[in-house]
Amino acid sequence: MKRRDISCEEMSLRIMALLDEELDDDQISGVKEHLETCKKCSDDYASIKKVKEVTSKMKFKKLPEFYWDDYWKHIYNRIERGLSWLFLSLGAIIILCFAGWAFLDKLIANQYIHPLLKVGIFIFMIGIIILIVSILREKLMVRRVDKYREVER
């Protein structure tokens, strides 16, 4: 492997592989030959090697236990609230669909209405129910954090 065979861009990848100890002996000797003849790559190698040495000596600061307790409490609260909104929305949709079905039961029993129209009315009612639940949920969520809530026109 000669310097003219490999560009400095490709050599930078090999330098990283050298620092990560991923090269075999032939590749290591080729990289070292290139580093002896190329000032730019040699400087890059030295700076990257220094960064790797410094970062390998770094340690994470151990947090006190009460930070972790507080963290997990917030995670559980967020999961619980998300699940409760999901179940609340699904429950409201099911109840309203059941009420709509009771209303449509008489409509479906009517022989004079075309079946396609019955299906269309049923799908329309389901869409309206889901939209109402979605809007109510959004209004309840926004009401808590609305910064313009107390602004009068």
Image (cartoon, rainbow, N blue to C red):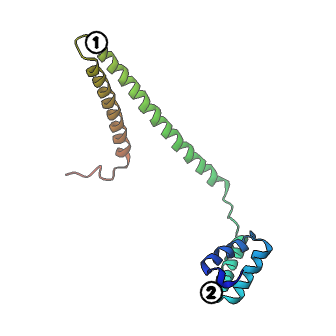
The residue identified by callout 2 is 40
Q: Residue at x 62, y 80 (%)?
A: 7
Q: Which quadrant of the figure has residue 107?
A: top left
**Circle 2: element type:** helix
Amino acid type assigned to the residue bearing label 2 in the image = Lys
Badge 2 local density, few (<14 within 10 Å), some, or many (20+)? few
Image spot of residue 16 (x, y percent): 68, 73
Q: Quadrant of residue 92?
A: top left
Q: Residue at x 35, y 24 (%)?
A: 96
| Residue in view at x 22 percent, y 51 percent | 152
Under mark 1, the amino acid is Lys
> Which of the two residues, 59 or 71, is positioned nearer the viewer here?
59
Residue 58 relative to residue 116: left or right = right
Q: Left of 34 or right of it: where is 132? A: left
Between disc 2 and disc 1, whose residue precedes? 2
Residue 112 as seen in the image, left or right of residue 60: left
Q: Is residue 148 above or below residue 10?
A: above
Disc 1 residue crowd, few under 14, some 14–19, many 20+, Cα 10 Å: few
Residue at which label 1 appears: 106
The spot of residue 66 in percent (x, y) is 64, 53
Q: Position of residue 109 (x, y in %)?
A: 29, 10
Q: Secondary structure at mark 1?
A: helix
Residue 88: image quadrant is top left
In the image, what residue occupies the spot 25% across and 52% down?
151
Q: Nearer the viewer, residue 151 or 134?
A: 134
